[in-house]
Image (cartoon, grey):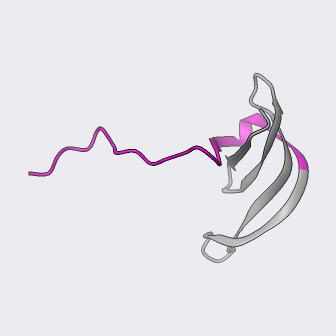
Amino acid sequence: MDKKIRVKFNGGREVTGVLKGYDPLLNLVLDDTEEQLRDPENNHLLDESRSLGLIVCRGPAVILISPVDGTEEIANPFVQAEE
């Protein structure tokens, strides 16, 4: 709660915002939310965003939730060592 998270939805939309609340169905309330815009031609993320403010995200549309701060890449333990 009260941490900045990134949320990805069905259809490819992505937003970042401060988590203010949630329920058992994974409906989310985000504040200070910004949507990352995509290029309509090739669907790549642009460096642009638009402010959405306070939003409610429907749980069934959520694909991924990740913290913005405190993440780090780790080595894949399932990769076979090359000979």
* Residue that appears at 69% across and 74% down: 40
Q: Is residue 64 magenta?
A: yes
Residue 78 to residue 34: above or below: above
* Residue that appears at 60% across and 70% down: 44
Q: Is residue 64 or residue 60 the one in the foreground?
A: 64
Q: In the image as oriented, which residue stretches furthest toward the right? A: 54
Image quadrant in which you'd find residue 20: top right
* Residue that appears at 68% across and 48% down: 6
The image shows residue 46 at horizontal and vertical percentages of: 67, 72
Q: In the image as oriented, which residue stretches furthest toward the left? A: 83
The image shows residue 24 at horizontal and vertical percentages of: 76, 22
The image shows residue 48 at horizontal and vertical percentages of: 74, 72
Q: Is residue 80 or residue 13 the one in the foreground?
A: 80
* Residue that appears at 70% across and 45% down: 5
Q: In the image as oriented, which residue stretches furthest toward the bottom? A: 41
Q: Which residues are magenta?
A: 54-83
The image shows residue 77 at horizontal and vertical percentages of: 30, 38
Q: Is residue 78 magenta?
A: yes
The quadrant of the picture occupied by the N terminus is top right
Image quadrant in which you'd find residue 3: top right
Q: Is residue 72 or residue 58 the one in the foreground?
A: 72
Number of numbered discs: 0
Question: In the rendered view, does 21 fall on the left or right side of 75?
Answer: right
Residue 1 to residue 44: above or below: above
Q: In the image as oriented, which residue stretches furthest toward the front? A: 70
